[in-house]
Amino acid sequence: MAEATWSPGRLVWYELYTPDVAKSKAFYEAVAGWKVTESDMGSMKYTMANVGEKPIAGFMPLSVIPMQGVPPFWMAYVSVPSVDEAAAGAKSHGGKVLMEPTDIPHVGRFAVLQDAQGAVISAFKGTDGDGAEVERPPVGTFCWSGLNTTDLDAAAAFYARVFGWTKGTFMGNAEMPVFLRGQVPAAGMMKAPPGVPPHWLNHILVADLAAARTKAVGLGAKVMMDNIAVPGIGTFCVITDNVGAAIALFQGTA
């Protein structure tokens, strides 16, 4: 049995909080090509999305959120050496801990954090490590996540304390700031458009953006941001899925 290894600062899991798990399952199976199954997690069933044999995301009923009026959303999980220290760091840098550090038997420990500007993300320490890191994500998996924020410098300071990230640029482009873990880009950051609250936006890699977008719209998605080309990298669009959760669809440059 391989020894467990961790990659602190890497985004390692994603979870959709949805009012209709069955509806979300049908949507992402059609648009992203996922195989969605149910797994036993002790006293509960957990709906899990897979690409091939690799688990990449989970679906949770929105009703588990204790606050009223929370819209459907995707949440990313970042690997940390200590969930408790990450939570303490969030509190000390103007953020909030929306869910205190909690153990999931045989899975790991996590906490839900809100940064000082209001974006929500989770800290996670898996029991069995983080799994192998791949250089080129396969089609159907999450390939990037980006923070939309009202204050880039404050966000950089917050995430430096919580996840150990530093602020850098993507391929030396000062117009494309990123979070780094060491020398490796961990996630993007950009100024949120006027009127848009701070949030994390996650990107799914698709083989054909036009086809995926058309299929998504046909299943009830709405296009929130039209296709944007990133020279030398690829093209993406932002949609809200058929339950209203924001997600980006990305096609890489061949």
Image: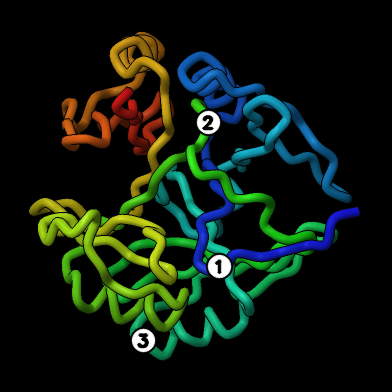
Q: Position of residue 107 (x, y in %)?
A: 77, 57
Label 3 neighbour load within 10 Å: few <14, some 14-19, many 20+: some
In the image, farthest residue toward the right = 1
Q: Is residue 214 left or right of residue 226?
A: right
Q: In terms of image quadrants, where is residue 250?
A: top left
Compared to 176, does 85 lie above or below?
below
For the residue labelled by badge 1, is the local secondary structure a helix, a strand or a loop? Answer: strand
- The residue indicated by pointer 2 is 138
Residue 179 is situated, as x and y percent measured from the top left of the image, at: 33, 65
C-alpha separation, residue under disc 1 versus residue under disc 2: 24 Å
Seen in the picture, residue 143 relative to 171 is either above or below; the reply is above
Q: Which mark is residue 163?
A: none
The mark that comes first in sequence, 1 or 2, is 1
Say what amino acid the circle numbered 2 marks: Pro
SS at mark 3?
Answer: loop
Kindly identify the amino acid type of the residue bearing the numbered disc 1: Ala
Q: CA distance from mark 2 to mark 3?
A: 36 Å
Label of residue 93 in the image: 3
Residue labelled with disc 1? 123
146, 175: nearer the viewer: 175
Whether label 1 touches label 2, CB < 8 Å: no
